[in-house]
Amino acid sequence: MFSLSRKLRRDGKVIGLVPTMGALHDGHLSLIRKARQMCDVVIVSIFVNPTQFNEISDFDAYPKDLTADSSMLANLSVDYIFAPSADEIYGPNFKTFVTVDDLSEKLEGSSRPGHFRGVSTVVSILFNTIRPDVGFFGQKDAQQVALIKRLTFDLGFEAEIVVLPIVREDNGLAMSSRNERLTPEQRSAAGIINQALLKASRAAQEGESNASKIAEIVRNTIESEPLGNIDYVAVVDNATLEPIEKISQSAVLIAVAVRFGEVRLIDNIVLGDQE
Ligand code: PAF
């Protein structure tokens, strides 16, 4: 991958990287289509990163089907699939991890200790190996996006980070490989999450600027659905993830995690200017 990327850069190609852990769905495909529009060469990495799983059982249970994933990519004119083994990414006696302070511990970080250290480390290794001009990520993982933008800037990676909107199922449920584990009843009920976020966004547009009130709208709406159990509703600054009190001009992230049975779903909406 090092020598391929070196050659591509020597030939003046604009390299787009779409990092994934496989189990591809329409959300990933939207990233790949955008990469195809923007870049000369599209590389999709498929690597189920062991260091970002808190439980080895979750890692073992994570769907791994390179053949199915590759055939989904067949019609999208992807130039390269990079599917390294864990030993290629994490060599013998691997000791070096990347941690993005503050951003890693909040929201998802508090219930998944070490998760973002794994994400930051693998993304740094992928960026360093492939040296993409553009990296494509989904807004669904808003905290991951904040963290990757931070580490790209802090570590001086040249990649531009392009973030694409959440792709949703017909009832508004954000696409995720986890949705497959919901019962049909839970899957249909989980549409309430997006309804709650939209309701809060409308309230903000109509002038509600108190962050606690906005959070309350989200909470009350989700609680009207008996199958959902809220883990958190957070109204935070989109870049620093610090809680805010008032909705103002700068981008505000409303992020939620909700359990439906055993399955924990995350979703979010951004209010205001994103850059
Ligand atoms: O979002 C994901 O699928 C993963 O966290 C990523 C960015 C591919 C790193 O393993």
Image (tube, rainbow, N blue to C red):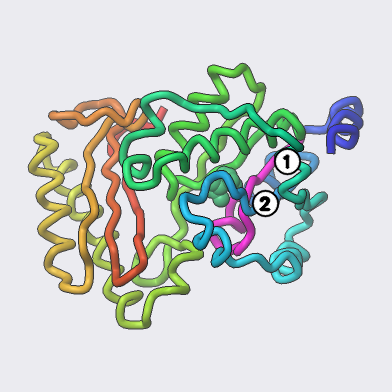
Q: Quadrant of the N terminus?
A: top right
- SS for callout 1: helix
**In the figure, 270 relative to 148: above or below?**
below
* Residue of label 1: 89
Residue at 73% of width from left, 62% of height from top?
73
Identity of the amino acid at label 1? Answer: Ile
- SS for callout 2: loop
Q: Is mark 2 within 8 Å of ligand 1?
A: yes
**In the figure, 32 relative to 225: above or below?**
above
* For residue 186, side relative to residue 31 (left or right): left
Task: Rate crowding at label 2 as few (under 14), some (14 to 19) or many (20 or more) other CA atoms within 10 Å.
Answer: some
Q: Nearer the viewer, mark 1 or mark 2?
A: 1
Residue 48 location (% of width, % of height)? 63, 54
Q: Quadrant of the C terminus?
A: top left
Identity of the amino acid at label 2? Answer: Phe
Report if the CB atoms under discs 1 and 2 are less than 8 Å apart. yes
Q: Is residue 45 magenta?
A: no
Q: Which mark is residue 47?
A: 2
Residue at 31% of width from left, 82% of height from top?
185
Residues in magenta, as a range: 15-31
* For residue 264, side relative to residue 25 (left or right): left
Residue at 56% of width from left, 27% of height from top?
98
